[in-house]
Image (cartoon, rainbow, N blue to C red):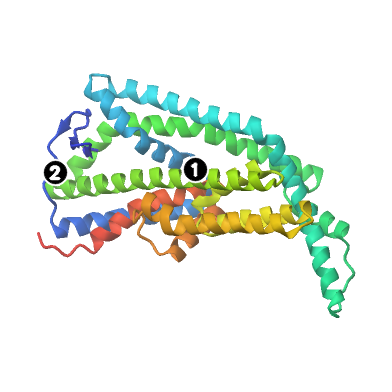
Amino acid sequence: MAEETGEGADRADGVPEAGPAPASGTHKRRVGVGIFLVVLVLLVLVNLVGGLLVPFLLGLLGALALRPAVDRLASVGVPLWVSSLILTIVAFLLTVGAVAALGYVFSDDLANLFDRIPSLLAQHLERGFSALKDWGFKVEPDVTAREVEELLRRLAPWGSSEGSFYLTVAGGAVKTLLLVFVTPFATFYLLADRVPVDELIRRRLSPADYDALVSYWREARMRFVSYVKGQGLLCLSQAILHTVGLSLIGLDFAVVIGLLTGLLAIVPTVGNLLMFSIALAVAGMQFTTVLPILGVIAVYGVSQTLESTVLAPKLIGGQIRMHPLLVLFLVLAAGVQLGILGAFLVLPLAAFATVAFGYLRYEQSG
């Protein structure tokens, strides 16, 4: 679609041209209604096909991220399909390489951490039961740590029966292959085929509606890019803060817990609270004095305060412009419907919906 990148808008071939004329309030509201209808259709599709949409949503986000680079190559004469293919392949190889490298380095620590979680929880529960008995409460039945641990391991997906374990692994492998092979194809075609799509939309809409749509797309993409950059820097800073802080304390699995805390920083409050609970459980079993445990509490408390007062306002600002409770609901709902990747995808996509909502409220008359 013809839109602005840098100083000016782009034609379908990537050559800058003058931006669209300012759209009237009527046309902006009409575009807002259209975008919300598209969102409604997507919600219906999510309910019908669930995780099958994830590779296509990832492809859309990848195309949005690569679009400026594709336009720069197109402006110096590189054919659109060639630049789209080259950048898609480069982005794919870099992503797969980074994930493979991280998996190779931290796979053993990650597996050991997950394997110890049932044992940690069971021992803390047994301590809690013992404390209740000491205080005069009657706890029935008399549960031992080993019994609780065995129950937790049966409930965990990696600790269930052998048959269901292999089914889980096979299902995960199919989803991974689908993600790996479909996502780059979706990214490439969304980049390379935007010219005929743009022409089709141009023919279907009036000039004023088309200009309003171009204006919406430009604003939504700018907000999306700003949010992704800010959220990426926020996650990186949180990962560094927690990794360094927990390592200085001497906590087992400090690097893995720190990196996971940074990764889950995209889930407001819940991600930080989950990893804080795991870090606290590990510290409670590792240390016999209270000072290191207080150190873990201090690391998470200071980092959460920095995120709320400095990092999030400066790096993300008001790009999403949603109430924190709504953000939390969207992340959890997407996680249930689409898995962990859905939880990561929902907020960048929400940037488009917030711009459409602003268009619906637009009161300026044409």
Q: Is residue 3 above or below residue 265?
A: above
Foreground residue, 276 or 57? 276
In-image side of 59 versus 215 (left or right): right
Report the amino acid beneath label 1: Leu
Residue under pointer 2 = 20
Label 1 crowding class (10 Å Cα cut-off): few <14, some 14-19, many 20+?
some
Asked which secondary structure carries label 1, the reply is helix
Side of 235 where 5 appears, left or right: left
Residue 348: horizontal and vertical position, in percent? 40, 48
Quadrant assignment, res 89: top left
- On the image, the x and y values in percent for residue 17 come to 14, 34
Report the residue marked by disc 1.
236
Residue drawn 22% across and 29% down? 14
Q: Is residue 158 visible?
A: no
Q: Tell me residue 340's x, y (percent).
A: 56, 48
What residue sits 81% from the left and 47% below the top? 161
Q: Quadrant of residue 59?
A: top left
Q: Pinpoint residue 250: horizontal percent, then vertical percent.
A: 69, 45
In the picture as drawn, the residue positioned furthest to the bottom comes out as 136
Residue 67 vs residue 238, the one in the foreground? 238
Considering the numbered disc 2 on the image, is that residue within a helix, a strand or a loop? Answer: loop
Looking at the image, residue 315 lies above or below residue 179: below
User: Of the residues shown, which amino acid type is indicated by label 2?
Assistant: Pro
At a point 19% along the width and 33% down the height, the residue shown is 11
Residue at x-position 49% and y-position 62%: 329
